[in-house]
Amino acid sequence: MKTFDEVVDFHGHSCPGLALGYRVSLRALKEFGRRSKDEEIVAVVENNSCAVDAVQLMTGCTFGKGNLIFRDYGKQVYTFFKRPSGKQVRISIDWKKPEENGEEEAMWERYLKGDHSAKVIKFVHDRKATKTRSILEADEKELMTVTKGRENLPPEAEIYRSIACERCGEKAAEPKVRIKDGKIVCIPCYDSASRRR
Ligand SMILES: [Zn+2]
Ligand SMILES: [Zn+2]
């Protein structure tokens, strides 16, 4: 099992989001046992925050292997499936950040408005460290809602035929190409052609 320090190493910094992802992953692994070597676990993540880096390193669910599925819902919800059983655990984060007093809120305001003075930076850094610690130490019950079930698995990673774009010549997966003025083109070529109009 990876430690939080190893996760920080992978991600590049320590932050509250990463701590959430770490706790979520620990919970999923508690359910499923070991790390995914070859698509044993599939993770469906409903955001693309720092937390997902922890999920990738901890559970072995990665974009490259096709067992990390991103749904752009902007929600702190993580669902893990085990293959081939379809056993499922859904984790929804309901952690509330520690209350802030007026002075602290004012400091955040300064930071968001672009004040990067040493005093403000130190404040932000300390607050983040406090939040991170509070997440790492929180009781599971105050951190997340866990529901278990069994559901249809998301489809296995699919391999598609690649088609050469008729504009730039680069290849793209078949379901991703578009038709532009009767030509088969890749998405970037499709988009740039539309912008020129
Ligand atoms: Zn981060
Ligand atoms: Zn192209």
Image (cartoon, grey):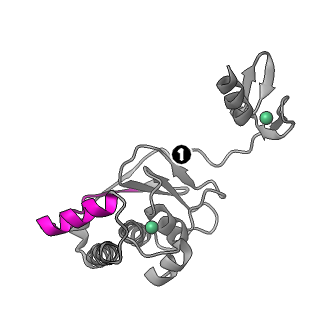
Residue that appears at 75% across and 40% down: 160
Q: Residues within 10 Å of mark 1 (few under 14, many from 20)?
A: few
Count how many numbered circles sit on residues in the image. 1
- Residue 149, x across and y down, in percent: 36, 52
Residue 128 shown left or right of residue 160 in the figure: left
Q: Quadrant of ligand 2?
A: top right
Image coords of residue 119 (percent x, y) = 30, 77
**12, 104: nearer the viewer:** 104
Vertical relation: 86 (above or below) 106: above
- The magenta segment: 89-112
Q: Quadrant of residue 28?
A: bottom left
Residue 164 location in percent, x, y? 85, 35
Among the 4 quarters of the image, the one containing residue 120: bottom left
Label 1 amino acid?
Pro
Q: Residue at x 24, y 63 (%)?
A: 95
Is residue 106 part of the magenta span, yes or no? yes
Q: Is residue 47 visible in the rendered structure shown here?
A: yes
Do we see residue 144 in this rendering?
A: no
- Which residue is disc 1 drawn over? 154
Nearest the viewer among 27 and 116 is 116
Whether 129 is drawn above or below 192: the answer is below
Which residue is painted at 41% across and 43% down in the image?
Answer: 73
Q: Quadrant of residue 35?
A: bottom right
Does residue 148 belong to the magenta stretch? no
| Quadrant in which the C terminus appears | top right
